[in-house]
Image: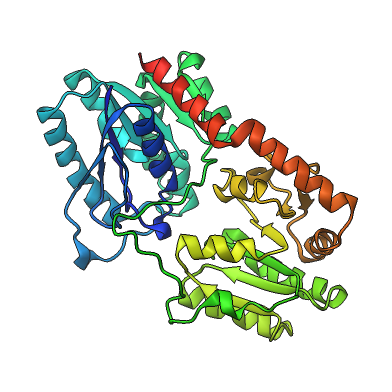
Amino acid sequence: MRALVVAPQPFFSPRGTPFSVYYRTLVLSELGVEVDLLTYGEGQDVDLPGVRIVRIPRFAFLGPVKVGPSMLKLFLDGWLVLWTLALLARRRYDFVHAHEESVFWLRWLKPVFGFKLVYDMHSSLPQQLSNFQYTRSRLLIGLFERLEDSCLARADAVITICPELADYAVPRVPDPARHLLIENSIFDEVRLVNGARTAAAADGTDPERQLPAGRPIVAYAGTFESYQGLDVLVAAFARAHARCPDAFLLMVGGAPEQVERLAARARAAGLDGHCLFTGRVAQPVAKRLLARADVLTSPRSEGTNTPLKIYELLASGKPLVATRILSHTQVLDDEVCVLVDPEPDAMAAGLVAALEAGPRRDGVVAAARALYERAYSRAAYERKMRALLEVLR
Protein backbone atom coordinates (compact mmCIF):
# COMPACT_ATOMS: atom_id res chain seq x y z
CA MET A 1 0.00 0.00 0.00
CA ARG A 2 1.06 3.58 -0.60
CA ALA A 3 0.05 6.39 1.76
CA LEU A 4 0.34 10.14 2.00
CA VAL A 5 0.59 11.43 5.57
CA VAL A 6 -0.22 15.14 5.95
CA ALA A 7 0.99 16.67 9.22
CA PRO A 8 0.42 20.41 9.75
CA GLN A 9 3.11 20.92 12.40
CA PRO A 10 6.88 21.35 12.81
CA PHE A 11 8.42 17.94 12.17
CA PHE A 12 10.45 16.95 14.06
CA SER A 13 10.55 19.50 16.89
CA PRO A 14 10.13 18.33 20.52
CA ARG A 15 8.79 21.80 21.34
CA GLY A 16 5.90 21.12 18.96
CA THR A 17 5.50 17.56 20.34
CA PRO A 18 4.73 15.84 17.01
CA PHE A 19 5.50 12.44 18.52
CA SER A 20 2.17 10.94 17.42
CA VAL A 21 2.94 11.68 13.76
CA TYR A 22 6.42 10.17 14.12
CA TYR A 23 5.18 6.93 15.68
CA ARG A 24 2.17 6.55 13.36
CA THR A 25 4.44 6.99 10.34
CA LEU A 26 7.18 4.75 11.74
CA VAL A 27 4.82 1.83 12.38
CA LEU A 28 3.00 2.24 9.05
CA SER A 29 6.38 1.94 7.33
CA GLU A 30 7.32 -1.10 9.44
CA LEU A 31 4.03 -2.73 8.40
CA GLY A 32 5.02 -2.41 4.74
CA VAL A 33 3.29 0.82 3.74
CA GLU A 34 5.22 3.11 1.40
CA VAL A 35 4.81 6.57 2.95
CA ASP A 36 5.21 10.16 1.79
CA LEU A 37 5.08 12.53 4.78
CA LEU A 38 4.10 16.12 3.96
CA THR A 39 4.80 18.63 6.72
CA TYR A 40 5.97 22.14 7.62
CA GLY A 41 9.47 23.35 6.79
CA GLU A 42 10.34 23.90 10.45
CA GLY A 43 11.87 20.98 12.33
CA GLN A 44 14.74 18.50 12.34
CA ASP A 45 15.15 15.70 9.81
CA VAL A 46 14.57 12.25 11.25
CA ASP A 47 15.56 8.78 10.15
CA LEU A 48 12.36 7.01 9.05
CA PRO A 49 13.24 4.07 6.75
CA GLY A 50 10.82 3.74 3.87
CA VAL A 51 9.44 7.25 4.42
CA ARG A 52 9.97 10.21 2.09
CA ILE A 53 9.66 13.50 3.97
CA VAL A 54 8.36 16.40 1.87
CA ARG A 55 8.44 19.92 3.34
CA ILE A 56 6.86 23.20 2.38
CA PRO A 57 9.20 26.25 2.52
CA ARG A 58 10.54 27.12 5.98
CA PHE A 59 9.55 30.84 6.15
CA ALA A 60 11.96 31.23 9.08
CA PHE A 61 11.55 35.02 9.12
CA LEU A 62 7.97 34.55 10.37
CA GLY A 63 9.19 32.94 13.59
CA PRO A 64 8.53 29.52 15.15
CA VAL A 65 5.17 27.79 14.99
CA LYS A 66 3.47 27.79 18.38
CA VAL A 67 1.06 25.23 19.79
CA GLY A 68 -2.60 25.90 19.00
CA PRO A 69 -4.42 27.89 16.30
CA SER A 70 -2.64 30.94 14.88
CA MET A 71 -2.49 33.13 11.79
CA LEU A 72 0.96 31.67 11.03
CA LYS A 73 -0.48 28.13 10.98
CA LEU A 74 -3.29 29.33 8.71
CA PHE A 75 -0.68 30.78 6.33
CA LEU A 76 1.42 27.61 6.37
CA ASP A 77 -1.65 25.42 5.87
CA GLY A 78 -2.35 27.33 2.66
CA TRP A 79 1.03 26.18 1.38
CA LEU A 80 0.31 22.65 2.58
CA VAL A 81 -2.84 22.66 0.43
CA LEU A 82 -0.78 23.55 -2.65
CA TRP A 83 1.82 20.84 -1.90
CA THR A 84 -0.97 18.33 -1.25
CA LEU A 85 -2.48 19.03 -4.66
CA ALA A 86 0.91 18.65 -6.34
CA LEU A 87 1.57 15.30 -4.68
CA LEU A 88 -1.91 13.94 -5.41
CA ALA A 89 -1.59 15.01 -9.05
CA ARG A 90 1.75 13.20 -9.47
CA ARG A 91 1.26 10.01 -7.45
CA ARG A 92 -1.61 7.66 -6.67
CA TYR A 93 -2.12 6.86 -2.98
CA ASP A 94 -4.21 4.06 -1.53
CA PHE A 95 -5.03 6.26 1.43
CA VAL A 96 -4.25 9.68 2.86
CA HIS A 97 -3.62 9.94 6.60
CA ALA A 98 -4.79 13.39 7.69
CA HIS A 99 -3.58 14.71 11.01
CA GLU A 100 -5.61 17.41 12.73
CA GLU A 101 -6.84 20.27 10.48
CA SER A 102 -5.45 18.83 7.24
CA VAL A 103 -8.63 16.74 7.11
CA PHE A 104 -10.51 19.96 6.36
CA TRP A 105 -9.11 20.19 2.84
CA LEU A 106 -8.51 16.49 2.28
CA ARG A 107 -12.20 15.79 2.89
CA TRP A 108 -12.97 17.80 -0.29
CA LEU A 109 -10.06 16.35 -2.29
CA LYS A 110 -11.06 12.75 -1.55
CA PRO A 111 -13.80 12.45 -4.24
CA VAL A 112 -11.59 14.25 -6.78
CA PHE A 113 -8.57 11.95 -6.43
CA GLY A 114 -10.31 8.78 -5.26
CA PHE A 115 -8.20 7.95 -2.19
CA LYS A 116 -9.40 6.54 1.12
CA LEU A 117 -9.23 9.03 3.97
CA VAL A 118 -7.97 8.46 7.53
CA TYR A 119 -8.79 11.24 10.01
CA ASP A 120 -6.28 11.15 12.88
CA MET A 121 -8.18 13.23 15.42
CA HIS A 122 -5.86 14.44 18.17
CA SER A 123 -8.46 16.89 19.49
CA SER A 124 -11.70 18.58 18.53
CA LEU A 125 -10.65 21.57 16.47
CA PRO A 126 -13.72 23.70 17.35
CA GLN A 127 -12.88 23.10 21.00
CA GLN A 128 -9.31 24.22 20.34
CA LEU A 129 -10.58 27.55 19.03
CA SER A 130 -12.28 28.09 22.38
CA ASN A 131 -9.61 26.57 24.62
CA PHE A 132 -6.81 28.65 23.11
CA GLN A 133 -9.11 31.73 23.11
CA TYR A 134 -8.47 32.16 19.41
CA THR A 135 -12.04 33.36 18.85
CA ARG A 136 -15.31 33.78 20.70
CA SER A 137 -17.35 33.96 17.52
CA ARG A 138 -20.18 31.44 17.74
CA LEU A 139 -20.53 31.73 13.97
CA LEU A 140 -16.93 30.71 13.32
CA ILE A 141 -16.95 27.97 15.97
CA GLY A 142 -20.26 26.66 14.60
CA LEU A 143 -18.79 26.59 11.09
CA PHE A 144 -15.86 24.50 12.32
CA GLU A 145 -18.22 22.17 14.18
CA ARG A 146 -20.20 21.49 10.99
CA LEU A 147 -17.01 21.00 9.00
CA GLU A 148 -15.61 18.63 11.63
CA ASP A 149 -18.85 16.63 11.65
CA SER A 150 -18.68 16.40 7.85
CA CYS A 151 -15.09 15.09 8.03
CA LEU A 152 -16.03 12.48 10.62
CA ALA A 153 -18.92 11.35 8.44
CA ARG A 154 -16.90 11.12 5.21
CA ALA A 155 -13.66 9.58 6.48
CA ASP A 156 -13.04 5.90 5.74
CA ALA A 157 -11.38 5.51 9.16
CA VAL A 158 -11.24 7.75 12.22
CA ILE A 159 -8.51 7.48 14.86
CA THR A 160 -8.91 9.04 18.29
CA ILE A 161 -6.24 9.12 20.98
CA CYS A 162 -8.16 8.88 24.27
CA PRO A 163 -11.54 7.59 25.51
CA GLU A 164 -12.99 11.08 26.04
CA LEU A 165 -12.30 12.02 22.43
CA ALA A 166 -13.63 8.64 21.28
CA ASP A 167 -16.90 9.31 23.13
CA TYR A 168 -17.15 12.61 21.25
CA ALA A 169 -16.32 11.19 17.82
CA VAL A 170 -18.10 7.82 17.68
CA PRO A 171 -21.68 9.20 17.57
CA ARG A 172 -20.62 11.30 14.57
CA VAL A 173 -19.15 8.34 12.64
CA PRO A 174 -21.83 6.52 10.58
CA ASP A 175 -20.18 3.11 11.06
CA PRO A 176 -18.56 2.63 14.51
CA ALA A 177 -16.40 -0.15 13.01
CA ARG A 178 -14.53 2.62 11.16
CA HIS A 179 -13.41 4.14 14.45
CA LEU A 180 -10.19 3.05 16.18
CA LEU A 181 -8.88 4.19 19.55
CA ILE A 182 -5.09 4.24 19.13
CA GLU A 183 -3.42 5.94 22.07
CA ASN A 184 -0.09 7.73 21.63
CA SER A 185 1.45 5.11 23.89
CA ILE A 186 4.85 4.17 22.48
CA PHE A 187 8.06 6.07 23.02
CA ASP A 188 10.93 4.67 20.97
CA GLU A 189 13.76 7.18 20.84
CA VAL A 190 13.41 9.49 17.86
CA ARG A 191 16.24 8.93 15.40
CA LEU A 192 17.63 12.17 14.01
CA VAL A 193 19.23 11.98 10.57
CA ASN A 194 22.57 13.40 11.72
CA GLY A 195 22.57 11.26 14.86
CA ALA A 196 23.21 14.34 16.99
CA ARG A 197 22.41 14.17 20.67
CA THR A 198 22.39 17.21 22.92
CA ALA A 199 23.98 16.23 26.21
CA ALA A 200 23.69 19.57 28.00
CA ALA A 201 21.15 22.27 28.64
CA ALA A 202 20.97 25.37 26.47
CA ASP A 203 23.36 27.31 28.75
CA GLY A 204 26.07 24.66 28.32
CA THR A 205 25.65 23.06 31.75
CA ASP A 206 25.11 19.36 32.21
CA PRO A 207 21.95 18.86 34.32
CA GLU A 208 22.81 15.23 35.03
CA ARG A 209 25.92 16.32 36.92
CA GLN A 210 23.88 18.79 38.96
CA LEU A 211 21.64 16.13 40.50
CA PRO A 212 22.64 15.32 44.08
CA ALA A 213 23.72 11.79 44.92
CA GLY A 214 21.90 9.85 47.58
CA ARG A 215 18.79 12.05 47.76
CA PRO A 216 15.32 10.81 46.67
CA ILE A 217 14.27 12.75 43.57
CA VAL A 218 10.75 13.85 42.70
CA ALA A 219 10.63 14.67 38.98
CA TYR A 220 8.43 16.43 36.46
CA ALA A 221 9.19 16.63 32.73
CA GLY A 222 7.14 18.40 30.08
CA THR A 223 5.91 21.82 29.07
CA PHE A 224 5.51 24.61 31.59
CA GLU A 225 2.12 25.83 30.38
CA SER A 226 -0.40 26.95 33.00
CA TYR A 227 -2.61 23.88 32.61
CA GLN A 228 0.25 21.63 33.79
CA GLY A 229 -0.36 22.63 37.42
CA LEU A 230 3.29 23.33 38.21
CA ASP A 231 2.57 26.08 40.76
CA VAL A 232 0.65 23.46 42.74
CA LEU A 233 3.50 20.97 42.38
CA VAL A 234 6.07 23.43 43.74
CA ALA A 235 3.83 24.37 46.66
CA ALA A 236 3.10 20.69 47.33
CA PHE A 237 6.77 19.73 47.24
CA ALA A 238 7.62 22.48 49.72
CA ARG A 239 5.11 20.93 52.15
CA ALA A 240 6.29 17.38 51.44
CA HIS A 241 9.89 18.50 51.92
CA ALA A 242 9.09 19.46 55.50
CA ARG A 243 8.27 15.79 56.14
CA CYS A 244 10.95 14.33 53.83
CA PRO A 245 13.87 16.79 54.16
CA ASP A 246 16.21 14.74 51.95
CA ALA A 247 13.82 14.92 48.97
CA PHE A 248 14.92 16.88 45.90
CA LEU A 249 12.70 18.36 43.16
CA LEU A 250 13.73 18.02 39.49
CA MET A 251 11.84 20.11 36.89
CA VAL A 252 12.69 19.38 33.25
CA GLY A 253 11.41 21.62 30.45
CA GLY A 254 10.05 25.12 30.06
CA ALA A 255 10.99 28.27 28.15
CA PRO A 256 13.48 30.56 29.96
CA GLU A 257 10.85 33.03 31.13
CA GLN A 258 8.62 30.19 32.39
CA VAL A 259 11.52 28.58 34.24
CA GLU A 260 12.50 31.86 35.89
CA ARG A 261 8.94 32.52 37.10
CA LEU A 262 8.59 29.05 38.62
CA ALA A 263 12.11 29.06 40.06
CA ALA A 264 11.25 32.33 41.82
CA ARG A 265 8.24 30.62 43.40
CA ALA A 266 10.47 27.76 44.52
CA ARG A 267 12.94 30.19 46.10
CA ALA A 268 10.09 31.97 47.86
CA ALA A 269 8.94 28.61 49.23
CA GLY A 270 12.36 28.01 50.78
CA LEU A 271 13.54 25.40 48.26
CA ASP A 272 16.98 26.85 47.48
CA GLY A 273 19.38 23.91 47.29
CA HIS A 274 16.52 21.45 47.09
CA CYS A 275 15.46 21.78 43.45
CA LEU A 276 16.86 21.93 39.93
CA PHE A 277 15.26 23.54 36.88
CA THR A 278 16.97 22.33 33.71
CA GLY A 279 15.02 24.22 31.05
CA ARG A 280 14.45 22.45 27.75
CA VAL A 281 16.77 19.55 27.02
CA ALA A 282 16.98 16.96 24.27
CA GLN A 283 14.72 13.92 24.52
CA PRO A 284 17.56 11.48 25.38
CA VAL A 285 18.76 13.79 28.16
CA ALA A 286 15.25 14.05 29.60
CA LYS A 287 14.96 10.26 29.61
CA ARG A 288 18.25 9.89 31.46
CA LEU A 289 17.22 12.51 34.01
CA LEU A 290 13.89 10.77 34.67
CA ALA A 291 15.74 7.47 35.06
CA ARG A 292 17.49 9.04 38.07
CA ALA A 293 14.17 9.92 39.73
CA ASP A 294 12.49 8.00 42.55
CA VAL A 295 9.00 9.47 42.04
CA LEU A 296 7.46 10.79 38.83
CA THR A 297 4.65 13.34 38.65
CA SER A 298 1.93 14.60 36.34
CA PRO A 299 0.32 17.52 38.20
CA ARG A 300 -1.88 18.69 35.30
CA SER A 301 -4.75 20.87 36.50
CA GLU A 302 -7.10 20.71 33.52
CA GLY A 303 -7.69 18.98 30.19
CA THR A 304 -9.38 15.94 28.68
CA ASN A 305 -6.80 14.43 26.31
CA THR A 306 -4.44 11.97 27.97
CA PRO A 307 -0.83 13.26 27.83
CA LEU A 308 1.53 11.13 25.75
CA LYS A 309 3.98 10.96 28.64
CA ILE A 310 1.50 9.09 30.87
CA TYR A 311 2.15 5.84 29.01
CA GLU A 312 5.91 6.16 29.43
CA LEU A 313 5.44 6.94 33.11
CA LEU A 314 3.31 3.81 33.52
CA ALA A 315 6.09 1.70 32.04
CA SER A 316 8.88 3.40 34.02
CA GLY A 317 8.99 1.09 37.04
CA LYS A 318 8.65 4.13 39.32
CA PRO A 319 5.67 5.34 41.36
CA LEU A 320 3.59 8.03 39.69
CA VAL A 321 1.73 10.83 41.47
CA ALA A 322 -0.99 12.29 39.22
CA THR A 323 -3.96 14.57 39.65
CA ARG A 324 -7.46 13.17 39.74
CA ILE A 325 -8.77 14.88 36.58
CA LEU A 326 -10.32 13.42 33.42
CA SER A 327 -7.10 13.85 31.45
CA HIS A 328 -5.58 11.21 33.75
CA THR A 329 -8.46 9.08 35.01
CA GLN A 330 -9.31 7.84 31.50
CA VAL A 331 -6.17 5.72 31.86
CA LEU A 332 -5.11 5.87 35.51
CA ASP A 333 -6.77 4.69 38.71
CA ASP A 334 -5.74 4.20 42.34
CA GLU A 335 -4.30 0.76 41.60
CA VAL A 336 -1.65 1.98 39.13
CA CYS A 337 -0.64 5.33 40.63
CA VAL A 338 -1.14 7.71 43.53
CA LEU A 339 -4.09 9.85 42.45
CA VAL A 340 -4.53 13.17 44.27
CA ASP A 341 -6.74 16.21 44.07
CA PRO A 342 -5.05 19.10 42.21
CA GLU A 343 -4.28 21.18 45.29
CA PRO A 344 -1.12 21.49 47.41
CA ASP A 345 -2.08 19.60 50.58
CA ALA A 346 -3.42 16.55 48.74
CA MET A 347 -0.47 16.47 46.35
CA ALA A 348 2.00 16.83 49.22
CA ALA A 349 0.44 13.82 50.94
CA GLY A 350 0.67 11.88 47.66
CA LEU A 351 4.34 12.76 47.23
CA VAL A 352 5.14 11.60 50.76
CA ALA A 353 3.25 8.34 50.18
CA ALA A 354 5.15 7.71 46.94
CA LEU A 355 8.50 8.46 48.57
CA GLU A 356 7.95 5.97 51.36
CA ALA A 357 9.01 2.40 50.59
CA GLY A 358 6.48 -0.32 51.26
CA PRO A 359 3.72 -2.54 49.82
CA ARG A 360 1.63 0.41 48.58
CA ARG A 361 4.49 1.81 46.52
CA ASP A 362 5.51 -1.62 45.17
CA GLY A 363 1.91 -2.47 44.32
CA VAL A 364 1.21 0.60 42.17
CA VAL A 365 4.50 0.15 40.30
CA ALA A 366 3.75 -3.50 39.48
CA ALA A 367 0.14 -2.76 38.49
CA ALA A 368 1.25 0.13 36.28
CA ARG A 369 3.74 -2.05 34.40
CA ALA A 370 1.12 -4.77 33.92
CA LEU A 371 -1.44 -2.29 32.58
CA TYR A 372 1.07 -0.84 30.12
CA GLU A 373 2.12 -4.25 28.78
CA ARG A 374 -1.47 -5.38 28.40
CA ALA A 375 -3.06 -2.33 26.78
CA TYR A 376 -0.47 0.21 25.60
CA SER A 377 2.83 -1.51 24.76
CA ARG A 378 4.44 -1.46 21.34
CA ALA A 379 2.92 -4.86 20.56
CA ALA A 380 -0.54 -3.53 21.46
CA TYR A 381 0.07 -0.40 19.37
CA GLU A 382 1.10 -2.46 16.35
CA ARG A 383 -2.06 -4.59 16.66
CA LYS A 384 -4.17 -1.45 16.53
CA MET A 385 -2.30 -0.12 13.48
CA ARG A 386 -2.78 -3.45 11.70
CA ALA A 387 -6.49 -3.16 12.45
CA LEU A 388 -6.45 0.25 10.77
CA LEU A 389 -4.97 -1.21 7.61
CA GLU A 390 -7.62 -3.96 7.63
CA VAL A 391 -10.35 -1.32 7.75
CA LEU A 392 -8.80 0.35 4.70
CA ARG A 393 -8.37 -2.78 2.56
Where residue 69 appears, as percent x and y from the top left, is: 37, 51
Q: In the image, what residue occupies the spot 47% across and 48% down? A: 130
Between 164 and 18, the residue placed more toward the observer is 18
Location of the C terminus (image quadrant): top left
Q: Is residue 73 visible?
A: yes
User: In this image, 211 relative to 115: left or right?
Assistant: right
Q: Is residue 333 above or below residue 176?
A: below
Above or below residue 313? Residue 293 is: below
Residue at horizontal 71%, vertical 37%?
A: 370
In the image, residue 327 lies at what x, y percent? 63, 45
In percent of the image, x 51 and y 78: which residue is there? 206
Q: Nearer the viewer, residue 166 or 352?
A: 352
309 relative position to 137: left or right: right
In-image side of 9 versus 273 (left or right): left
Q: Quadrant of residue 199?
A: bottom left
Is residue 262 visible from the viewing direction of this image?
Answer: no
Residue sitting nearer the eye, 141 or 70: 70
Residue drawn at (42%, 16%) of the image:
390
Picture coordinates of residue 163 (x, y %)?
60, 32
Q: How is the image coloured?
A: rainbow
Task: Reply above or below: 322 against 344.
Answer: above
Residue 169 appears at what percent x and percent y? 50, 27
How many numbered circles does the render carry?
0
> Where the N terminus falls, by quadrant?
top left
Q: Quadrant of residue 377?
A: top right
